[in-house]
Amino acid sequence: MSRAAVRVIVPCFNEEKRFPTESFLSFIKREEDYDFLFVDDGSSDGTAVLLEKVCALMPDRLHVLKSQPNQGKAAAVRLGFLHALESQTPRFLAYWDADLATPLETLPEFFRVFRERPEVEIVLGSRVKLLGWDIQRQILRHYLGRVFATCASHVLRLPVYDTQCGAKMFRVNAVLHEIWREPFLSRWIFDVELLARYLSARQDNPFDSERRIYESPLKTWRDVKGSKVKPADFFKAFAELFRIQMRYGRIISSSCAKVGS
């Protein structure tokens, strides 16, 4: 692995036909602060072979980790983080969707937040549609997402706008090691469970998390053709949100009560 400041974990499953090879190569040649770890999550097409070829072009900055069988995005991202945390750990870790719905050019914007605000430990991409910004989402997914985000915010006791954007960056510290240690209960909404774990780990002062978690509005985000997330999956997401509520809700609520007393 290189000595880049930021290591980006990219989960990949059957991405052979839409993997944006040139975008990754162009970015890595232009930006010195980043390297990438692609996690092939048991793909059944030629994704693994493609990733090996791409990584061979810049072996000091691009790497592939294979996982068999397919276990889902949550497990793939966790595997990548554990691998990174066990190696020569960079100062920051991120995960990014392979389809680049969030452009790689957003990575330096996230990194800038950490440099300018040393108290921040997590930066979340937030798909806020504003005039003059290019946020393109299917209308049904947008409204279902808003309903889900409101429910997730209630469970977390945190005014978070967008938990599900596949672009997040973390400062490497003891808390980060803790929240990735155990497998996730959730397969579809592990992002919410990840935040619940963070709040639980920092239960001595949970309201301070509003200062440590920063939502960065994205200037560009586009639904990419071939997405594996379907509108029907939102119903599965609500079932998993209930499980997260049952597992972590009491810890978060008791922490809020302590600070409020």
Image: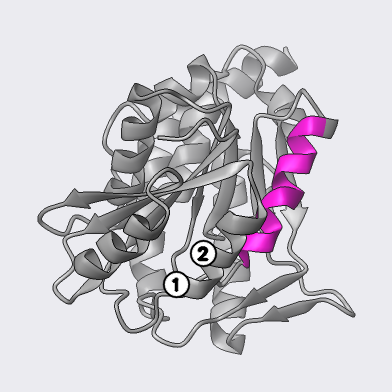
Stretch in magenta: 103-115
Seen in the image, is 213 located left or right of residue 29? right
Task: Report which residue position mark 2 lands on.
Answer: 24
Residue depicted at x 42% and y 43%: 60
Q: Position of residue 59 (x, y in %)?
A: 37, 48
Packing grade of label 1 (10 A; few <14, some 14-19, many >=20) is: some
**Residue pictured at 33% horizontal, 66% vertical:** 236
Residue that protrudes farthest toward the right in the picture = 131
Spot occupied by residue 211 in the image (x, y as percentages of width and height): 77, 30
SS at circle 2: helix
Q: Could you tell me residue 180's position as x and y percent?
A: 38, 31
Q: Relative to residue 219, is residue 37 drawn left or right?
A: left
Q: Position of residue 220 (x, y in %)?
A: 72, 72
Against 217, residue 208 (above or below) is above
Q: Quadrant of the C terminus?
A: top right
Dividing the picture into quadrants, the one containing residue 85 is: top left
Residue matched to label 1: 21
